[in-house]
Image (cartoon, rainbow, N blue to C red):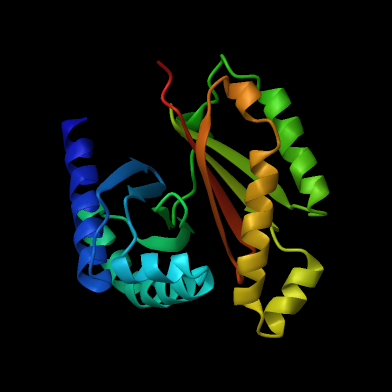
């Protein structure tokens, strides 16, 4: 446990330093969770002075465009450093931001397959009702998923993997060069539907944040739910 905690601390320090170097300001805190094959990096207090000015002028799209461009440049650095620290080859990397709460999440996924036995669903939460609510969200989005996998990472982090996350219309938009417009439209819509789905009644505690991202080529998407810690 001490070794694992030390690795999580090292990853958090690396991410904090990297963001500070390239954005001019680092997050106030970074929470790292490592559970094969996932590395979840959730940070808070991350908005630069210039971004705050742009957000006051409702220029949120410019903020996201700049962040996404920078992160694209940083991905090779992040992959290399994570391999050095954790010892895993990172195959997938996902990013999402919550500008209102000044938070963000990076999700790195290694090449190995997740073992369901390491992510057992807690007995106190009704899995059937959760799955029904999640299925209803997918129906509302008119999504014909190939597969849905749910991973209970720890007492405050739930990870959902969707295979076949893109509809045919969305694929056409991507082929025609509108992937960024799609993300700006699709992400807040999906987040609002997930927030309104009533999952909190299953967990009997508040969902603090929902992050989501997907890969256009693999057609795989992830949802991260950050829950309140049960008192």
Give the residue at x 79% y 39%.
136
Give the residue at x 64% y 64%.
219
- 168, above or below 41, in the image: below
Residue 43: percent from left, percent from top = 34, 50
- 167, above or below 180, in the image: above
Exactly how many numbered labels are in the figure? Answer: 0
Quadrant of the image occupied by residue 77: bottom left
In the rendered image, the quadrant that contains the N terminus is top left
Report the side of 80 relative to 174 (left or right): left
In the rendered image, the quadrant that contains the C terminus is top left
- 120, above or below 15, in the image: above
- 137, above or below 108, in the image: above
Residue 150: percent from left, percent from top = 59, 38
Give the residue at x 39% y 43%.
36
Give the residue at x 59% y 19%.
125
Residue 201: percent from left, percent from top = 65, 22
Report the side of 131 relative to 152 (left or right): right
Residue most toward the bottom? Answer: 176
Residue most toward the front? Answer: 57
**Front position in the image: 214 or 80:** 214
Report the side of 17 relative to 166 (left or right): left
Residue 104: percent from left, percent from top = 41, 54
Report the side of 173 relative to 99 (left or right): right
């Amino acid at each position: 446990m001490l070794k694992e905690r030390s690795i999580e601390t090292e990853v958090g320090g690396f991410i904090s330093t990297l963001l500070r170097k390239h954005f001019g300001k680092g997050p106030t805190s970074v929470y790292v969770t490592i559970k094969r094959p996932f590395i979840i990096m959730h940070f808070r207090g991350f908005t630069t002075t210039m971004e705050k000015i742009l957000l006051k002028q409702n220029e949120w799209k410019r903020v996201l465009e700049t962040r996404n461009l920078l992160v694209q440049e940083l991905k090779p650095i992040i992959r290399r450093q994570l391999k050095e620290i954790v010892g895993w080859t990172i195959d997938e990397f996902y990013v999402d931001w919550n500008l209102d709460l000044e938070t963000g999440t990076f999700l790195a996924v290694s090449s190995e397959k997740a073992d369901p036995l390491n992510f057992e669903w807690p007995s106190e939460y009704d899995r059937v009702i959760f799955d029904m609510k999640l299925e209803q969200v997918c129906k509302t989005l008119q999504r014909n998923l190939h597969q849905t996998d749910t991973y209970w990472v720890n007492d405050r982090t739930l990870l959902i993997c969707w295979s076949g996350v893109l509809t045919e219309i969305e694929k056409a938009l991507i082929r025609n060069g509108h992937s960024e417009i799609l993300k700006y439209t699709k992400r807040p819509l999906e987040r609002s539907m997930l927030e309104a789905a009533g999952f909190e009644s299953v967990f009997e505690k508040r969902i603090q944040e929902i992050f989501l991202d997907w890969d256009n080529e693999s057609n795989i998407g992830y949802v991260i739910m950050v829950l309140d810690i049960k008192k």
